[in-house]
Image: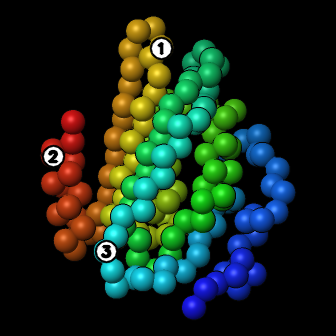
Amino acid sequence: MKQTRDKAGLKALGKESPIRKEYAPEVLETFENLHPGNDYWVRFNCPEFTTLCPITGQPDFAEIRISYIPDKRMVESKSLKLYLFSFRNHGDFHEDCINTIMKDLIALMDPKYIEVTGFFTPRGGISIYPYANYGRPGTKYEELAQQRFATHE
């Protein structure tokens, strides 16, 4: 059975949405996963992520990759886009951005597994690629997180 935006309780999808000027996790929305018994990957590539260096105030640019195995709830993509845009004027280190994104998405949808990687463009000749992951404790997803973390390059 297909869900409509109204039935799913989504507010941003299909409507004009203002871009937030500050970090705004409250814009994130979820909808029901219609296949919670299946394990499958959902991946978002966000190639236009920007944030500010907390020391210099200069812009930092990255591609953010989010991969997760949903349980009962899934993140709605437009709300994710608005959320990621909210980092534009937010000052945080690269590693903090990645961990904040992952923790916000865990709190939002309680996925079975999630990983977030940032591919930040070079500043001063150095690129930084922070990676964070999480698997639900006490499950095979916790083991998956340990295995993927150990073999992450």
Q: Left or right of 143: which side holds 131?
A: right
Nearer the observer: mark 2 or 3; the answer is 3
Dot 3 corresponds to which residue?
A: 39
Figure quadrant of residue 39: bottom left
CA gap, disc 2 to disc 1? 27 Å
- Which secondary structure, mark 1? strand
Which residue, given by chain and number where applicable, does mark 1 sit on? 123
Looking at the image, is 141 positioned above or below residue 21? below
Q: Is residue 95 visible?
A: no
Q: Secondary structure at mark 3?
A: loop
Q: Neighbour class for label 1 at 10 Å: few (<14), some, many (≥20)?
A: few
Inspect the image, locate mark 2, and give the three-letter code of the amino acid beneath it.
Answer: Ala
Local crowd size for mark 2, using a 10 Å CA cut-off: few (<14), some (14–19), many (≥20)? few
Q: Residues within 10 Å of mark 3 (few under 14, many from 20)?
A: few
Q: Of label 2 and label 1, which has the lower sequence position?
A: 1
Q: Which residue is mark 2?
A: 150
Left or right: residue 61 versus residue 96 is: right
Q: Earlier in the sequence, mark 1 or mark 3?
A: 3
Along the viewing direction, whichever of 134 and 5 lies nearer the viewer? 5
Q: Looking at the picture, how far across and down is residue 36, in whole percent?
A: 40, 82
Q: CA distance from mark 1 to mark 3?
A: 38 Å
Q: Give the residue type that dot 1 points to.
A: Arg
Q: Residue at x 43, y 37 (%)?
A: 118
Q: Is residue 89 left or right of residue 92?
A: right
In the orientation shown, which residue stands out farthest toward the bottom? 1
Could you tell me the amino acid type at mark 3? Asp
Disc nearer the start of the sequence (2/3):
3
Residue 117, given in percent of the width and then of the height, sits at 39, 42
Q: Is residue 93 visible?
A: yes
Kind of element beneath mark 2: helix
The front one of 48 and 88 is 48
In this rendering, is residue 49 above or below 66? Answer: above
